[in-house]
Image (cartoon, grey):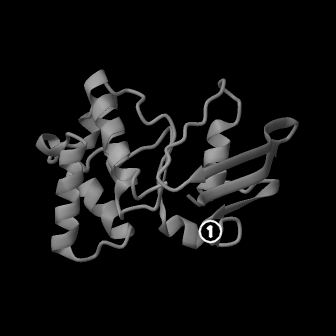
Amino acid sequence: MSVALRATGIRKTFGDVVANRNATLEVMKGEIHAVVGENGAGKSTLMRIIATLQEPDAGEIAFGEVDVRRQKDAMRRMLGYLPQEFGFYPAMSAEAVLDHFAVLKGLTRDRERREVVHWLLHQTNLYEARSKRVGGFSGGMRQRLGIAVALLGRPRMLIVDEPTAGLDPAERHRFLNLLSDVGEETV
């Protein structure tokens, strides 16, 4: 099995605070990894660096043949990302939010986009709430919508930061099963 993601020597500082010091990570295709550590240990910073949202002070990152630091756009096209904190326009419906992000991910054909949106709404147990405004969603419902957005466009890599926060045990189980299914094709 070949290495799909390799991050070596990642360093990131914020003034006097060292968020990452020589962080190294290797992930094989089909593997699911968890980055574990205390609050403030630099886990989210490392994920944002791999997702091209922050520039490291030092280090190299490769996803397959892509040099992530130099080819940010190529990485972003292959990436699904669920940050720890995110927001949606509260007046939009769940279906409209997913439809909007699907267009941004390049799903421009109406029928295909509608099928993908409905599939994701079913997978995240939001289909019955698809017409409701997301501003009225519970924390768990918003989290499931964020998961659906991250899965749009069949990402080759999926980065999720605290993905089960706010999910009840049944939804947590559903999400982990979904991750397992997606993980066969996705890092």
- The image quadrant that residue 135 belongs to is top left
77 vs 121, left or right, is right
Question: Horizontal placement of 28 versus 127: left or right?
Answer: right
Can I make out residue 53 in this image? no
The amino acid on which the numbered mark 1 sits, given as a three-letter code, is Lys
Residue 78 placement, left or right of 13: left
Residue drawn at x 28%, y 76% is 108
Residue, far bottom:
109
Q: In this view, does 101 lie to the left or right of 156?
A: left
User: x%, y% of residue 170?
Assistant: 26, 26
Going 31% across and 43% down the picture, which residue do you hit?
178
Q: Is mark 1 on a helix, strand or loop?
A: helix
Q: What is the residue that sits farthest to the right in this orientation?
A: 16
Name the quadrant of the N terminus: bottom right
Toward the viewer: 141 or 4?
4
The residue carrying mark 1 is 72
Image spot of residue 33 (x, y percent): 54, 41
- Residue 138, image quadrant: top left
Extreme residue in the left direction: 128
Q: Residue furthest front?
A: 1
Determine crowd level at label 1: few under 14, some 14-19, many 20+ residues with C-alpha closer than 10 A. some
Residue 101 lies, in percent from the top left, at 35, 61
Residue located 56% across and 53% down the image? 28
Q: Is residue 115 above or below residue 65?
A: above
Q: In this orientation, does residue 84 appear?
A: yes
Expressed as whole percent of the image width and height from the top left, the position of residue 55 reads: 73, 57
Number of marks in the rendered image: 1
Establish if 129 lies above or below 182: above
* Residue drawn at the location 42% of the way across and 44% of the way down: 87
